[in-house]
């Protein structure tokens, strides 16, 4: 399973949707994911890929991690996985 597919699967599970309902342009808000759901998604992603996501749940706007769309989350995870592998 690709990083993209796994991230979409995690986000879909959090939103109680089918992965096919999650598009790259989707925002977490549009999927019905609140701040608690976001934190749970981040934890699930960290566990799935054995990485640490630089995200501050208390100050998401201060984070270096872009959560503006599903595509930006996937890009960020791909970068973190690549950095870890290097």
Image (tube, rainbow, N blue to C red):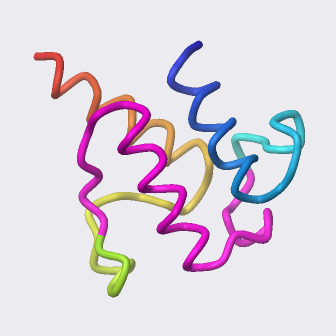
Q: Where is residue 60 in the image (x, y as percent from the top left)?
A: 38, 78
Q: How far across and down, in percent of the image, does residue 34 sit?
A: 65, 78
Seen at 28% across and 79% down, the residue is 62
Left or right for 19, reference 50: right
Check if residue 48 falls in the magenta segment.
Answer: yes
Residue ID at (71%, 72%): 29
Please give the range of residues in magenta: 26-55
x then y, percent, for residue 77: 39, 38
Q: In this view, does 30 lie to the left or right of 60?
A: right
Up-down relation of residue 58 to residue 41 (above or below): below
How many marks the image carries: the answer is 0
Residue furthest left as drawn: 86
Give residue 86's position: percent from left, percent from top. Answer: 10, 16
| Image quadrant where residue 22 sits | top right
- Front one among 47 and 77: 47
Please tell me which residue is depicted at 69% across the width and 61% down the height of the picture. Answer: 27
């Amino acid at each position: 399973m690709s990083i993209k597919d796994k991230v979409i699967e995690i986000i879909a599970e959090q939103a109680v949707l089918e992965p096919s309902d999650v598009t790259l342009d989707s925002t977490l808000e549009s999927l019905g994911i609140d701040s608690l759901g976001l934190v749970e998604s981040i934890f699930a992603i960290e566990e799935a890929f054995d990485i640490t996501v630089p995200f501050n749940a208390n100050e998401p706007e201060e984070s270096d991690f872009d959560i503006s769309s599903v595509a930006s989350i996937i890009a960020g995870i791909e970068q973190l996985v690549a950095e870890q592998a290097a």
